[in-house]
Amino acid sequence: MSETAHFALEGNLMARPMLETLGPRHVAIIMDGNGRWATMRGRPRLFGHHAGARRVREVVEACPDYGVKYLTIFAFSTENWKRTQVEVAGLMSLFRRYIMKEMQAFVKENVRVRFIGDRPRLDAKLRALMDEAEDFTKHCTGVNLTIALNYGGRDEVARAAQRLAMDVKEGKLDPAEIDVETLPRYLDTCFLPDPDLVVRTSGEARISNFLLWQSAYAEYEFIDTLWPDFTPEELGRLCAAFGGRDRRYGAVKA
Ligand code: FPP
């Protein structure tokens, strides 16, 4: 498949200046509440997922205004396959259409898109679009958008352990050298800094297997807003609140 089979670049790149702040550089979001948002309106759950997908771009585009250089969003978990066949198929179709529709806009906004998660279980067409999107946006130097698709934190650590064991078996790695610096290099997120702030929408106070290793020192915000109602202004408020927090990473204040 050619690099631009599904999306071709038109127009100029808009390099938006990134604000330097004391706020979080890496924000990770568990986008929850689409189903309830739809049910409250008497509509099927997929209606909520479509509304949720429409929210993503404006939140990504607001990131430079708040100094957020990395945004990681949880789109589909390794546990979400347990949903009905209709919902799973609808979500997969939404992801395919989303990639085809949004990548040009992301390039214009200088947004680099990457995916984390276990890809082999996804269908070939979706995997090809994911590869294409990563390739198409790889020159972008603004916001780094990472989409977690068929992602689970435990699954990621297990896959990393497999690759690590393979390197030991092949004599590329000495087991005595494996430490907290080594393991993250085998994680899906090896290209990302750890998240500073993890947000979960919809009032649930759980982390649901999201970025387990990476969030060891993250700040958490559990907010009541359902994802389709989440706004750039709310992101701004969360970033401002983060700026006032005292992060000690296990040490005591000097
Ligand atoms: C959780 O809400 C949401 C999901 C499992 C899917 C998330 C997907 C999107 C926001 C849209 C697509 C995203 C991209 C990047 C195209 P839920 O269905 O569990 O809500 P509920 O708890 O109210 O049932």
Image (cartoon, rainbow, N blue to C red):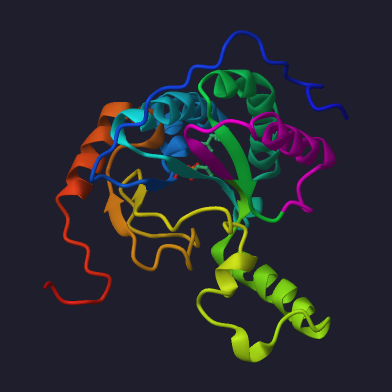
Membership of 141 in magenta stretch:
yes
Q: How many marks on residues? A: 0
Residue at 17 percent of width and 55 percent of height: 245
Q: Residue furthest top?
A: 11
Q: Residue at x 60, y 8 (%)?
A: 11
Quarter of the rendering containing residue 4: top right
In the rendered image, the residue lying farthest to the bottom is 176
* Left or right: 9 in relation to 69: right
- Residue 166 location, x and y as percent? 79, 77
Residue 39's x, y, as percent? 44, 32
Q: Position of residue 76 (x, y in %)?
A: 59, 47
Q: Is residue 199 visible?
A: yes
- Up the image or down, 8 lies above or below 55; here it is above
Position above or below: 171 against 225: below
Q: Nearer the viewer, residue 31 or 63?
A: 63
Q: Is residue 179 above or below residue 117?
A: below
Does residue 83 appear in this view?
A: no
Q: x, y percentage for residue 152?
A: 58, 60
Is 252 inside the magenta-drawn segment? no
Q: Tell me where the magenta segment starts and ends, as one range.
A: 119-147
Which quadrant of the rendered structure holds the N terminus? Answer: top right
